[in-house]
Amino acid sequence: MDTAAIGSEARSSIGAAQSLDEIEKLRVAYLGKQGSISALLKTLGGMTPDERKEEGPKIHALREEVTAALGARKAELEQAELEQRLAAETLDLSLPAPETPKGSIHPVSQVMDELAEIFADMGFAVATGPEIEDDWHNFAALNMPESHPARAMHDTFYFPQAAGETGANEALDRAGSSARMLLRTHTSPVQVRTMKAQGAPIRIIAPGRVYRSDSDATHTPMFHQVEGLVIDKGIHLGHLKWTLETFLKAFFEREDIVLRLRPSYFPFTEPSVEADVGFAIENGRRVLGGSGDEPGHGWMELLGSGMVNRRVIEMSGLDPDEWQGFAFGVGVDRLAMLKYGMDDLRAFFDGDVRWLRHYGFSPFDQPTLSAGVGARA
Ligand code: DAH
């Protein structure tokens, strides 16, 4: 092939090359030791000076041209490859984030936050006490001395008495049974602890864990209560009724909650009342609201309360002639079940993520009175 033919073939094959590999092969084919342009250069030696004068510049120009064309095509292919990679690797920042597992707020925590919010609005602070309690605070100071029949209802978890510990039993003998340790069976001992620690006046709620040896669909060995305590001068049952009504209306977010106070008995209150709320049956489910006396309605027992027994006020270090008060206690888990519609208490403590996903709350669902305490974001 002559210079012109090699030139036109090289131009078209370099222009058609689709990869860096092909470019390299073409470079070898034209400019390599055995390449066709290298072979043309070798023919210069056998030419006459005139022929060489004529052919030499053409062959050299062809070599330059092919070298430049190979370089240019190579740069084009490299640029295309880069663009393709950039296109493939783009990140679409407007895409929604992928679903990731999220934690949730347990309904018990949610209800406790709701209670704190509702009672804070009425001027109540939150108080706490130990879950490992002694007999005196859990029973004796609440007017349940040793052998009081009401103790039998509590199914108490007592701690074993440390027989081997020198002095332990002697100390116990001296203090009587009141030093015996147990898991608190209710939040009522926080009443005693708060009166002793703060004196009066008092307005507190005390939410927390309590323990009883009991287990079925509506009882678990650990459950939650919230205690309420108001101590001041001139406190009477009317204050109790208003407080409970205001609390339950705010909690269930219904104005038509109707309360019925029923005479009852607790050792630590006198008089004692149990509060029932009216409900209606709608689609086979109990819906709170309205009087339980209407046809097709009923009353549901909700909480225990009463005027704090003057003996309790006295044992807690206050003068019952000067200070009076009311108290109430209610199951937090039960409140959660009624408000959010669960029917098996045991599921509260199974830690099943499907249950938590269904009944749990977002950390952004902070209860506020203005948004409705149970508002879900
Ligand atoms: N401590 C009681 C219980 O666990 C509940 C209770 C009843 C608390 C009456 C009170 C109250 O403060 O006044 O069954």
Image (cartoon, grey):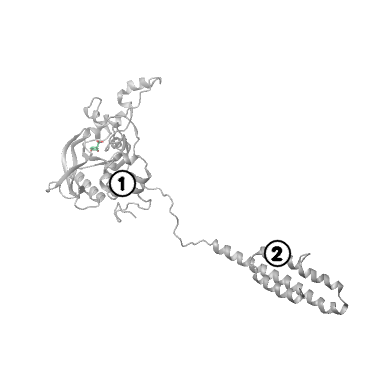
Q: Which residue is drawn at 75% across and 77% down?
A: 4
**Label of residue 111 in the image:** 1
Quadrant of picture, ligand 1: top left
Spatial separation of the CA atoms under disc 1 and disc 2: 76 Å
Q: Nearer the viewer, residue 155 or 46?
A: 46
Residue shown at 24% from the left, 30% from the top: 153
* Residue 74, quarter of picture: bottom right
- In this rendering, does residue 44 appear at all? yes
From the image, tell me which residue sits under label 2: 25
Q: Is residue 121 above or below residue 66?
A: above
Amino acid found under the numbered disc labelled 2: Lys
Q: Is mark 2 within 8 Å of ligand 1?
A: no
Assess mark 1: CB under 8 A from ligand 1?
A: no
Decide: few, some or many residues near mark 1? Use Cα within 10 Å; few <14, some 14-19, many ≥20: many
Q: Which sits earlier in the primary sequence, circle 1 or circle 2?
A: 2
- Mark 1 lies on a secondary structure that is helix
Q: At 24% across and 48% down in the image, what residue appears?
A: 247
Q: Do the residues labelled 1 and 2 touch (CB within 8 Å)?
A: no
Q: Position of residue 35 (x, y in %)?
A: 76, 67
Q: Nearer the viewer, residue 163 or 72?
A: 72
Mark drawn on residue 179: none
Q: Which of 73 and 330 is in front in this view?
A: 73
Residue 284 coordinates in the image, percent (x, y): 20, 48
In-image side of 161 versus 280 (left or right):
right
Where is residue 373 shown, x and y percent of the image?
A: 30, 52
Residue 236 appears in the picture as rendered: no
Q: Residue furthest front?
A: 1
Q: Which amino acid does label 1 sit on?
A: Val
Mark 2 lies on a secondary structure that is helix
Quadrant of res 228? top left
Q: Residue 139: x and y, percent?
A: 27, 30
